[in-house]
Image (cartoon, rainbow, N blue to C red):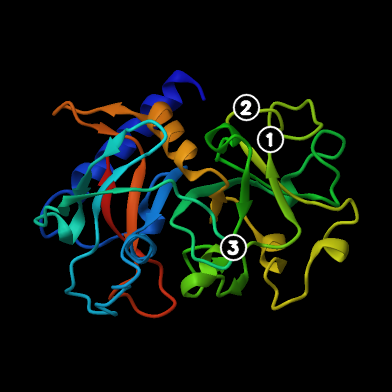
């Protein structure tokens, strides 16, 4: 990422955050966030640290989100929440600090996600320079280094049109269900500038025979990936979320006028949102 692009990106992020911290601002949605970002599902976090309570406030839109300070046990780093949009007057669960390593447990909803956008779609693959056309799915703006190259594409947190193909990709805990047969990693075998950018990742079918061999045909959980277009957003679940959140902290720390720092770590919640709509952004951790 060159210096001019990085500076422009930081300016955009600052503008989004500055607007969102104004009390009374309309809801900020997941699709409004910069990519890549690290996303914390605050409802899943509540269920993780308070299993006996669970999401006891149901879908009450007026209920306050669970937004504690987060301590990364590996390093002792503490991230503190700053509420945004319509929650800007709420100080967060500032009397609570929870340890969270963002472990991935099969069968349980994920707490941490990497939010990313497609920068090149299937039809933009370059024959002989990218992965074989039978396996190349998309190039995305999430750098594999942000997760040590260990992350899986999942159905996702936001249901929306993917290209011209509508698939309600997530529903509650289903948002962290793996898209079968799809792998994520660095650029492939090509020598083109587009295919070797060090700060981009590639989605590909795991088998050289492509979707015929990889698609599970179990409710189209991975079929939607064939229809990704430039600008579409998606989410991955990192194998080591704690390490990933620390890498975001290193990569995207932005010094603001008040000496605070934006590290692109945001909290989202679907509480009070219509069924099938994308979640609301409720806070940023710094």
Q: Give the image location of residue 153, x and y in percent.
A: 62, 55
State the residue at coordinates (41%, 67%): 278
Secondary structure, mark 3, is loop
Mark earlier in primary sequence (1, 3): 3
Q: Give the image location of residue 51, x and y in percent.
A: 35, 68
Which label sits in the foreground, 1 or 3?
3
Up-down relation of residue 223 to residue 3 (above or below):
below
Mark earlier in primary sequence (2, 3): 3
The 10 Å Cα crowd at callout 3, few under 14, some 14 to 19, many 20 or more, is: few
Secondary structure, mark 2, is loop
State the residue at coordinates (68%, 61%): 225
Contact between marks 1 and 2 (CB within 8 A): the answer is: yes
In terms of image quadrants, where is residue 221? bottom right
Residue 35 visible, this orientation: no
Which label sits in the foreground, 2 or 3?
3
Q: Give the image location of residue 186, x and y in percent.
A: 68, 35
Q: Taking 249 as reference, is 65 left or right?
A: left
Circle 2 is placed at which residue position? 198
Report the label total: 3
Secondary structure, mark 1, is loop
Circle 3 is placed at which residue position? 106
Q: Which mark is residue 186?
A: 1
Between the C-alphas of marks 2 and 3, the distance is 30 Å
């Amino acid at each position: 990422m060159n210096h001019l692009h990085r500076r422009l990106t930081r300016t955009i992020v600052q503008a989004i955050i500055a607007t969102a911290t104004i009390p009374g601002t309309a809801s900020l949605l997941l699709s409004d966030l910069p990519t890549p970002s690290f996303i914390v599902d605050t409802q899943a976090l509540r269920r993780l640290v308070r299993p006996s309570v669970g999401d006891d406030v149901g879908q009450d839109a007026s209920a306050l989100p669970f937004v504690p300070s987060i301590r990364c046990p590996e390093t002792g780093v503490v991230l503190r929440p700053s509420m945004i949009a319509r929650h800007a007057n709420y100080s967060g669960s500032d009397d609570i600090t929870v340890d969270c390593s963002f472990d991935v447990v099969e069968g349980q909803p994920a707490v941490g996600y990497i939010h990313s956008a497609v920068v090149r779609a299937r039809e933009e693959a370059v024959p002989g320079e990218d992965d074989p056309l039978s396996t190349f799915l998309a190039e995305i703006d999430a750098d594999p280094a942000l997760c040590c190259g260990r992350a899986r594409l999942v159905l996702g947190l936001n249901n929306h049109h993917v290209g011209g193909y509508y698939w309600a990709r997530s529903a509650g805990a289903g948002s962290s269900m793996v898209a079968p047969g799809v792998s994520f990693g660095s650029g492939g075998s090509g020598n083109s500038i587009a295919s070797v950018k060090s700060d981009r990742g590639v989605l590909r079918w795991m088998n050289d025979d492509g979707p015929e061999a990889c698609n599970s045909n179990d409710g189209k959980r991975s079929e939607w990936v064939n229809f990704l277009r430039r600008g579409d957003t998606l989410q991955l679940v990192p194998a080591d979320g704690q390490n990933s959140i620390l890498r975001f902290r290193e990569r995207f720390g932005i010094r603001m006028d008040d000496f605070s720092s934006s590290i692109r770590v945001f909290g989202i919640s679907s509480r009070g949102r219509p069924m099938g709509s994308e979640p609301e952004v409720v806070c940023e951790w710094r």
